[in-house]
C-alpha cells in the first residue's frame, strides 16, 4: 500500500505540500534562494494550482494549495519545479546529487476546520523551529502578505474568507499560538 504522502493528487482538492532537504540539510542558503523559489513557483505553478499559504524554512518548506483539474500536469510541474530548484542550489553551492527527499509529500486537507488549522501550522512553523517569535516578522512566510494589500500570487481573498476576513485570520492565529500543535491535533513535520 502506498504511503499516505505518495497518493496521486486529486482534482480540485486542497493539499498540504511539503518536503525537506536530504538528511535535514539546507535547501535555502541565501535571501536570493528564497526569492527565486517563490518567483519560480509563481511562474511555473500559478496556472495549475491556487496557492493559499506557504512557509520556507532553511531546510524545508510548506505549501497550502488547491489543485486544478489536470492533476497529472500539476504533479509533473511540481517535479520540474523542485528539480529546477535543486539544480540551482547545487550549482550555487558546488554540490551534487539530490537536494530534496523524493517524492514530494502531499496530504489532502479534507474539511474546513483542518484547512484553518493548516494555515496556522504553516505560519507557526518559524516559531516552532525557534527562528522568530511572531509570524508577522518572518519574511519567508505568507502570513504578512495575507495581512497586507501587497500584490501576490496567493488567493488572498478566499484564504481570508475562511476566517471571516483579516481580523478573524489574525485572531485565529493568536488564539492557537497559545496552545501546542499537539493539543490541537496538528501534525508535526
Image (cartoon, grey):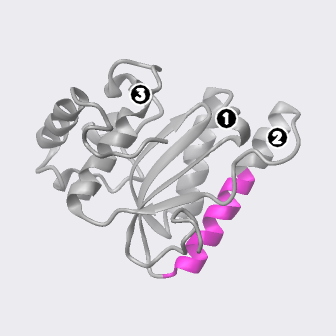
Residue receiving disc 1? 24
Nearer-N-terminus badge (2/1): 1
Q: CA distance from mark 2 to mark 1?
A: 15 Å
Of the 4 image quadrants, the one containing the N terminus is: bottom right
Q: Is residue 186 left or right of residue 42?
A: left
Q: Is residue 98 left or right of residue 68?
A: right
| Secondary structure found at label 2 | helix
**Residue 159 is at least partly visible in this image:** no
**Residue at left 16%, top 41%?**
166
**Residue at left 18%, top 42%?**
169
**Residue at left 33%, top 45%?**
186
* Residue 90: assigned label: 2
The single residue placed furthest to the front in the displayed view is 1
Image spot of residue 121 (x, y percent): 35, 41
Image spot of residue 51 (x, y percent): 41, 57
| Secondary structure found at label 1 | helix
Residue receiving disc 3? 128
Q: Is residue 54 left or right of residue 32?
A: left
Q: CA distance from mark 2 to mark 3?
A: 28 Å
Q: Is residue 107 above or below residue 160?
A: below
Q: Is residue 73 magenta?
A: yes
| CB within 8 Å, label 2 to label 1 | no
Range of magenta residues: 70-84
| CB within 8 Å, label 3 to label 1 | no
Q: Name the mark nearer the viewer: 2 or 1.
A: 1
Q: Residues within 10 Å of mark 3 (few under 14, many from 20)?
A: some
**Residue at left 48%, top 46%?**
62
* Residue 32: assigned label: none
Nearer-N-terminus badge (2/3): 2
Image spot of residue 108 (x, y percent): 40, 65
Q: Name the mark nearer the viewer: 2 or 3.
A: 3
Amino acid at each position: 500500500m502506498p504511503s499516505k504522502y505518495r497518493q496521486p493528487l486529486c482534482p480540485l482538492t486542497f493539499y498540504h505540500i511539503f518536503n525537506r532537504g536530504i538528511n535535514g540539510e539546507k535547501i535555502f542558503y541565501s535571501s536570493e534562494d528564497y526569492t527565486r523559489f517563490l518567483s519560480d513557483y509563481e511562474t511555473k505553478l500559478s496556472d495549475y494550482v491556487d496557492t493559499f499559504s506557504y512557509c520556507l524554512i532553511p531546510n524545508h518548506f510548506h505549501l497550502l494549495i488547491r489543485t486544478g483539474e489536470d492533476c497529472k500536469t500539476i504533479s509533473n510541474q511540481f517535479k520540474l519545479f523542485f528539480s529546477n530548484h535543486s539544480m540551482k542550489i547545487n550549482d550555487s553551492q558546488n554540490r551534487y546529487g539530490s537536494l530534496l527527499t523524493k517524492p514530494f509529500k502531499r496530504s489532502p486537507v479534507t474539511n474546513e476546520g483542518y484547512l484553518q488549522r493548516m494555515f496556522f501550522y504553516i505560519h507557526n512553523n518559524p516559531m516552532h523551529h525557534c527562528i522568530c517569535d511572531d509570524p508577522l516578522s518572518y519574511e519567508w512566510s505568507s502570513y504578512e502578505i495575507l495581512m497586507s494589500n501587497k500584490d501576490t500570487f496567493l488567493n488572498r481573498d478566499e484564504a481570508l474568507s475562511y476566517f471571516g476576513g483579516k481580523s478573524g485570520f489574525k485572531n485565529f492565529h493568536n488564539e492557537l499560538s497559545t496552545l501546542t500543535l499537539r493539543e490541537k491535533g496538528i501534525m508535526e513535520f
